[in-house]
Amino acid sequence: MTTFLFSILTAGSDRMAQTDPHGWTLTIISVTVVFLALIVLYFLYNLSGKIFTGAFKRKPSTKKTNAQVPDAEVAAAIALALDMEEDGDTYAAIATAIHLYLASGVHDTEPGIVTITRKDSPWNNKALTFRKLPR
């Protein structure tokens, strides 16, 4: 069985030695395949790095539509209508809160990145957690 495989392999190498005695064709093909594989891997790693770091996150839209955002006159009309009720301060605060919520005046844009800083304390200090064994 091994002699059969060896004869197949040597037949291919003998034919290659006859067609390309110096081996330039094999060298150029192998170097090209390796460099193409490296270029493909570079783009894959670069793309996956951008995906996992969040470079492709959608930005929040800053465009405001007129249907969602009431202007100051509408908020004042709501506040005046609610002021005629028993407790005007509560309803005015509700109308102001609704106006600020719909106008996006309350919310700020968060980056979405949580940073955690490590602070040393006696609980996680390595020098204090070692046992001192007597000799």
Image (spheres, grey):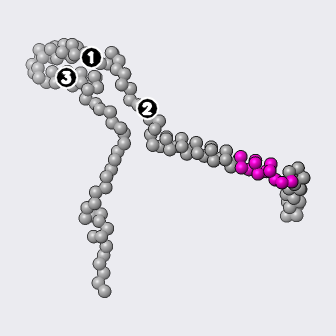
Which mark sits nearer the N-terminus, 3 or 2?
2
- Residue type indicated by callout 1: Pro
Mark identifier at residue 58:
2
Q: Is residue 70 left or right of residue 94?
A: right
Viewer-side label of 3, 2: 2
Q: Where, quadrant-wise, is the C terminus in this rendering? A: bottom left
Report if residue 28 lies within the magenta region: yes
Which mark sits nearer the N-terminus, 1 or 2?
2
Report if residue 19 lies within the magenta region: no
Task: Check contact, mark 1 vs mark 2: CB within 8 A.
Answer: no
Query: Residue 40: x and y, percent?
Result: 62, 43
- Residue type indicated by callout 2: Arg
Q: Which residue is mark 3?
A: 96
Q: Which residue is mark 1?
A: 70
Which mark sits nearer the N-terminus, 1 or 3?
1
| Residue at the image point whose x is 49% and y is 40% from the top | 51
- Residue type indicated by callout 3: Thr
Is 17 in front, or is 51?
Answer: 17
Is 61 in front, or is 1?
Answer: 61
